[in-house]
Every structure is written in C-alpha cells, then in structure tokens.
Image (tube, helix red, strand yellow):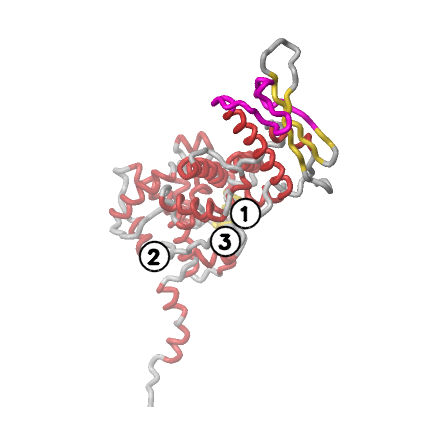
Amino acid sequence: MTSDSYFTLGFYIRKPQTDRAEYPIFARVSVAGQATEFKIGRTVDPANWDAKKHLCRGRTRRDLELNKYLEMVRSKLCDIHNMLIRENKFINPAILKSLFLGNGEKQKMMVEVFREANEKRKEELDRGDIVKPTYQRWTRCADYLEEFFRLNHNTPDIPIKDVTSGILDDFQHFLRMKKNCANNAAVRYLRCVKNVMQYALAHKWITHDPFIGKKYQRTYNERQFLSEAELKAIMNLNLKDIPRLELVRDTFVFCCFTGLAFCDVKTLLRSDISTDANGAVWIRKARAKTGELCVIPMLDIPMQLANKYADNPVVKATGVVLPVITNQKMNAYLKEIADLAKIKKLLTTHVARHTFATTSLCNNVSIEVIRKMLGHTDIKTTQIYAKMQDQAVYNGMETMRNKFNGISIN
C-alpha cells in the first residue's frame, strides 16, 4: 500500500473527433500525484454539463439518471479503495481503474476452488495414494456445496472470502436435514471443506479461517458382529437351489475367516495367495484403503470356498479368488440370508470383518496379530473392531473360577 493512499475522483467531458452532439464523460482518478483517466460509458449535452460540480445541470429524467450513475461510479470506486486498504494491498490509479473496469484479479469462488482441489484428488487417485470412494466423497461434497448455495443464496457459488462460520453451520444443517447424512458422514464432508479452506488460507485467498473454534466429533456406535453360533447357522444353510444367495453367503463366510473388507475381497487375486516353505498358505495383500499389507493365514474353510469357485468363468477370466458381486446387492441379499438363518442382526459386508476380529479375539489371538491381519496402521483402530464377546469374558475368568470356586465363607 502506498504511504498516501488517499484518492480523488473527478469527471469531465471531452469533445469527440466526430461531429456528435453529445460529449463522452471521463473519470479522472488521482493517488499520491499519479493519475489515470477512463471513459465511464456515458455521454452528455455539453450545454448541460457543470464543470465545477462534475455533474449534469439538466432536469430531465435522463439527466437525473445520469447524475445517479455518476454517484454510483464514485461509490463503487470508494468500495474498491476501502477493500484494498482492508487487505493491505498496494494502491495506485491504475489498480483502481483496472478493478473498476473488471480487469483486476478475479476473486476466488468457493466451489471453483473446491473443484480445483478435486483435480489434485484425481491425480492422487491415479497414483494410488487414495481410493475411489475417497475421491467420490470429495466430488460429491463439491456438488452438495453448489446445491446448498443455490438453495440458500440463490447462486451456484460465492466468493471463498465470504464463507463464514455461520455458513458452515448452515451447510452442516443442510447435510443432515436435506441430504439425510448421518453425523459421521456430515463430519467427513465438513473435513473436506476444512481442507479446502486451509488450502485457500495458505494461498492468501482468505485472511481468516472460519473453522477456528469449531470441533466436529464422530460418533462411535456399537459395531455388529456374529457369534460363533450365528456364524455356524449361516454356514449350515442349504442354498444350492438359490445360487445368488449361495454366492453371497460364501463370500460373506470367506470374509468372516479372513477379515478382508469388501473392496479387498472383490479384488483378491489368486496370485495374492502363496504357500511358504512349511506348506502353510497365506494371503498377502495391500489394503485398498490404507495400503497397509495384510498377512492372513488361510484356514480350511476359506480354502474350501476358493477351490469351490476355481472353475467359475469369472474367476478363470480375471484371476480373482471369488466372483464377488456389487456391495449393494451383497447387502440386500444378506438380509434374506439373515432371515433364513433366523438372525435378527442387520447383516452387511462389513459385519464379516467385525466378526473375524471378535472371533479371533475370543480364540486367544493377540490384538497385535489381529492388527496385522486386518491391515490396520494404528492398534487403536483394531481395538474398536475387536469387541469382546460374553464367552471371551467368561473364559478370561477361568483361572479365578478354578481357584476360588468351592471355598465357603466363615
């Protein structure tokens, strides 16, 4: 900013080179001894122009509207000048002229910046740094923001510097009420927005962070898993007459004994299964979500299932272990399987992963070994999955039970 940022504005007319009756009006802007001139797009009868007062003397409706326009030009230039002072930017006549005529630096818009960030997410997806669902969450969040602005601000986008803490609260309400997002889903979207705002702050497109003082907490619900009895009930179902349910049941049981998430079992290749020098069979596969290597010993049941589908056309053509269908159909068919097995729990593909963790824990597998098999980077995540069953608690008290049972109190 110049040491003397005060500016003056005047209007004057200039005789055109042609024989036109009206003269064009020019604005003259001066700052610290520097000056620039530009046309404002209006003309006036020179007989009605007051050179001292810089306005039109006429009393017609057209003359009065011209004076209002001159006042609007003055007001707009004052607003631009005040904005430059607030942002501590350099001020000279050329900058004021450029911004007035719309030739200055284009202000950054929220959705526009978000979509620019999504281009970087696409590059990360192509490199394998993030998975497709993460990228889809980012693109969906940009679409939700645009829909939110249309609904609440009657525009598809707003300047990113105008995003306030209140707008973030309104967007959270929009996600919960209009898009029916659960708390955790809304928190994930808001974290994407926060990432974009941090990106804008680093590039000095905004001067404040509207997320300051805000904390969005995820809720951790009790995770569903199957007991050994419930798992056996599903395994004992005779589904040979319903091939679609049989495939879903077999895929689900395979995950219950390997701990693989849906996206990992769907892409599990036969080349991911190997035999060591001692004859033990292992699954070694990097998780799609984190890239962490899962090291899982193959028990007899998943081995049987893998051999069962060895001649399946999809398995032969693609080299996968199982011909897994879509996650949506899997979850829909699992509801039918739960009814047939008389299980009242809501079965989803991820319940199999929880079941693997709890079953392993109840069979005295250490939490560190479970972490390695599940491919978790943090053991705290494993502790969330590995919920103790009642039988595990009962077995854990076996030593005390044997020591104190039968002793009477005097």
Q: Is residue 152 left or right of residue 108?
A: left
Q: Amino acid at mark 2?
A: Ser
**Inter-mark Cα distance, 2 to 3:** 40 Å
Q: Nearer the viewer, mark 3 or mark 1?
A: 3
Q: Amino acid at mark 3?
A: Lys
Specify the segment rendered in magenta.
36-63
**Residue 80 sits in quarter:** top right
Q: Report the residue marked by disc 2.
A: 227
Outermost residue on the bottom side: it is 410
Query: How would you rate the neighbour count of disc 1 (Cα within 10 Å): few for under 14, some for 14-19, many for 20 or more?
Result: some
Asked if 195 appears above or below 66 in the picture, the reply is below
From the top left corner, tell me how far across and down residue 26 is, in percent: 63, 23
Q: Report the residue marked by disc 3.
A: 214
Q: Are marks 1 and 2 in contact (CB under 8 Å)?
A: no
Query: How would you rate the neighbour count of disc 2 (Cα within 10 Å): few for under 14, some for 14-19, many for 20 or more?
Result: some
Q: Are marks 3 and 1 in contact (CB under 8 Å)?
A: no
| Residue shown at 54% from the left, 39% from the top | 160
